[in-house]
Image: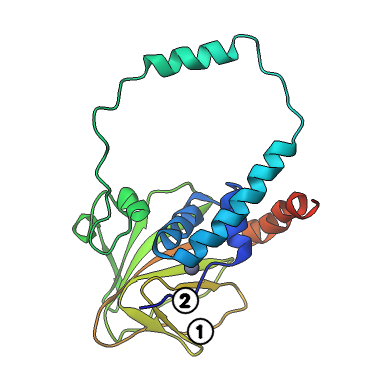
Amino acid sequence: MKIRHHLSDQLLMAYSVGQLPEAFNLVVATHVSMCDECRARLASFDAVGGALIEEIDEIAMGEAALEAALARIDGLPQATRTEPLKTAGIFPAPLADYVGGDLSAVRWRRIGGGVKQAILPTGRSATARLLYIPAGVAVPDHGHRGMELTLVLQGAFADENDRFDRGDIEIADEEVEHTPVALAGEDCICLAATDAPLRFRGLVPRLAQPLFRI
Ligand SMILES: [Zn+2]
């Protein structure tokens, strides 16, 4: 099915310059791995960052820096084989790495109404979780504090405004009031990231400033 709900330019830009909290990084990387369109847009932001780096005045490093780096590379064990790509079931590679396998590796906790969640280990400035919502069930306790990203991995959900299928990402903030319901037919599994209010809101303008100055 074609992906209809994509990442915003702001999120792709913040991801490109490496300034997103880890939980958001994970959601962005997972969507990008599923979505040709966002992967292409991300490449254009990466190119802007590369151009910026080219323009920056050089700062000399210590005299022995190059030698020390090369010596350390020599000291590393040789890779004897390439790791198998961990794409596992419904989990694209970036997410499979976090979970450590496929769905069977997830340690779910029930949160009521048949809904289960599993918090993923990320830095504490934002939280990433897997959500399991049985077909036909509404998502409980859904106030938005700060920004929330929700990426569908299996099944689909709908709210008053739209429908989200596998690969679709919903970007919600405090303004959004809705009641997402998992559609009938298949249990819905999502990857969601939330942050503290204001933290993210302040971040994007700060990032955009140096980028737009050129
Ligand atoms: Zn996309």
Left or right, 28 with respect to 145, comes to left
Which residue corresponds to mark 2?
A: 142
Residue shown at the point (34%, 50%) measured from the top left: 98
Residue 5 horizontal/vertical position (percent): 49, 75
Q: Can you say which quadrant of the picture contains the N terminus?
A: bottom left
Residue 14 horizontal/vertical position (percent): 61, 54
Q: What residue type is labelled 2?
A: His
Residue at the far right in the pictured view: 213
Mark yes or no: residue 195 visible.
no
Helix, strand, or loop for circle 1?
A: loop
User: Along the line of sight, which residue is nearer the eye, 151 or 3?
Assistant: 3
Residue 50 horizontal/vertical position (percent): 64, 43
Mark 2 burial class by Cα count in 10 Å: few <14, some 14-19, many 20+? few
Residue shown at the point (30%, 60%) measured from the top left: 91
* Quadrant of residue 198 within the rendered picture: bottom right
Residue 191 horizontal/vertical position (percent): 39, 64
* Quadrant of residue 128 within the rendered picture: bottom left
For marks 2 and 1, give the one nearer the viewer.
1
Which residue corresponds to mark 1?
A: 178
Q: In this view, does 29 lie above or below 177?
A: above
Residue shown at the point (35%, 63%) measured from the top left: 130
User: Along the line of sight, which residue is nearer the eye, 26 or 146?
Assistant: 26
Left or right, 67 with respect to 131, comes to right
Q: Which amino acid does label 1 sit on?
A: His
User: Along the line of sight, which residue is nearer the eye, 121 or 189?
Assistant: 189
Mark yes or no: residue 84 visible.
yes
Left or right, 103 with respect to 190, comes to left
Q: Are marks 2 and 1 in contact (CB under 8 Å)?
A: yes
Residue shown at the point (48%, 15%) measured from the top left: 70
Q: Looking at the image, is mark 2 or mark 1 earlier in the sequence?
A: 2
